[in-house]
Image: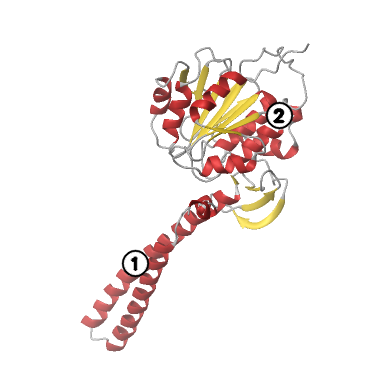
Amino acid sequence: MGAVLQRDVVVVAASAGGIEALRTLLGNLPAGLRAAVLVVLHISPRAGSALPGILDRAGPLRSAAAQDGEPLLHGRVYVAPPDLHLLVDGENVRLSRGPRHNGHRPAADPLFLSAAAFAGPRTLAVMLSGTLDDGARGCAEVERRGGLVAVQDPEEAPFDGMPRAAVAATSRPMVSSVREIAQWIARECGGTASPPRETGETGETGETGVDRKLRHELDAFFSAGVPGPPPGRFSALTCPDCNGPLYEVASPPNGHYQCMVGHAWSMESMVDGQSEAVERAFWVAILRIEERLRLLTRMLGNAEERGQALVARRLRQQTERDRDALETLRHLQSRIGREAPAQVTHGDERR
């Protein structure tokens, strides 16, 4: 009788409302967990280093900021540092300042995709509270390669965008409370250990088993070179991060957009990223018109002092037009919201 598959790579993602969920999850995992746990939380690039300490005090497993190149060990929690992607690279941890995904670094999708590529069916993916849909595509890839997915019950999550997106992207997720997910992890990681993999082994869990699209995307994190055009069709859209051309790449559940340098966006995160880009453009326009108004006001004063009536009248008219334009821009800017598309999508369900 063959050995039971050892599921020993647990990847966890959270965003808004996720710290308490992470504490609950780690607080309910056993001390002798036979798996490595890798955690991504959407945090500011300028955030401090408090998160590993918070998670270290949450339960019996040792939590620490991940270090590039360190081995994956059972009973350890590896926390993504600010402004660095956390990745699985064979039996080691990798950190990368590669392109942002869905507007984030660290992001859930790079971690989940790398775990799916290198650990395949050994992977357990866990999605906790957060907005929008980062990690949904990674969950689908983990499931496609034989891994399992667990999702915090959207009714329990303070922010249900990421959990709902993960449920929609997968076909058989385990949806439950965070405490029950911790028990599920302990059960799934209790199988008999598989024999060590040989260096030259190929197949679904090895690098040679990674399909072209996924390998191209991961190259942006593991290689210093520019990956080149993505394996998709030109979309006539531009990247909110770098303004480069975007290619539409077929991937579950709804495809994604990727630029030449590797920034990747789901449709939902693209809407949010474009909203931010539009808001920035509005503020630039408002600033320029305000500067122009100050200059016109100064010129109008000079013309009036010199008795230049015709010039003063022209400048006065231009000043009024610019004030009207400024008022219109400020009104439009106030109406450009960044409400998550998931909130709009699920709005009817909450009535």
The residue sitting at 42% across, 20% down in the picture is 56
In the depicted structure, whether residue 94 falls above or below residue 346: above
In the depicted structure, whether residue 34 falls above or below residue 221: above
Give the residue number, with chain letter if any, for mark 2: 146
Give the residue number, with chain letter if any, for mark 1: 290
| Residue sticking out furthest to the bottom | 310
- For the residue pair 70 and 23, the one nearer the viewer reads as 23
x, y percent for residue 22:
46, 29
The residue sitting at 46% across, 54% down in the picture is 338
x, y percent for residue 179:
49, 26
x, y percent for residue 223:
64, 33
The residue sitting at 52% across, 36% down in the picture is 153
Left or right, 168 with respect to 312, comes to right
Classify residue 91 by image quadrant: top right
Circles 2 and 1: CB distance less than 8 Å?
no
Residue type marked 2: Gly
Q: SS for tag 2?
A: loop
Classify residue 310 by image quadrant: bottom left
Neighbour tally class for label 1: few under 14, some 14-19, many 20 plus, Cα within 10 Å: some
Neighbour tally class for label 2: few under 14, some 14-19, many 20 plus, Cα within 10 Å: some
Left or right, 282 with respect to 171, comes to left
- For the residue pair 155 and 345, the one nearer the viewer reads as 155
In the depicted structure, whether residue 294 falls above or below residue 111: below
x, y percent for residue 162:
53, 41
Residue type marked 1: Glu
Q: Earlier in the sequence, mark 2 or mark 1?
A: 2
Instruction: Mark 2 vs mark 1: give the one in front.
Output: 2
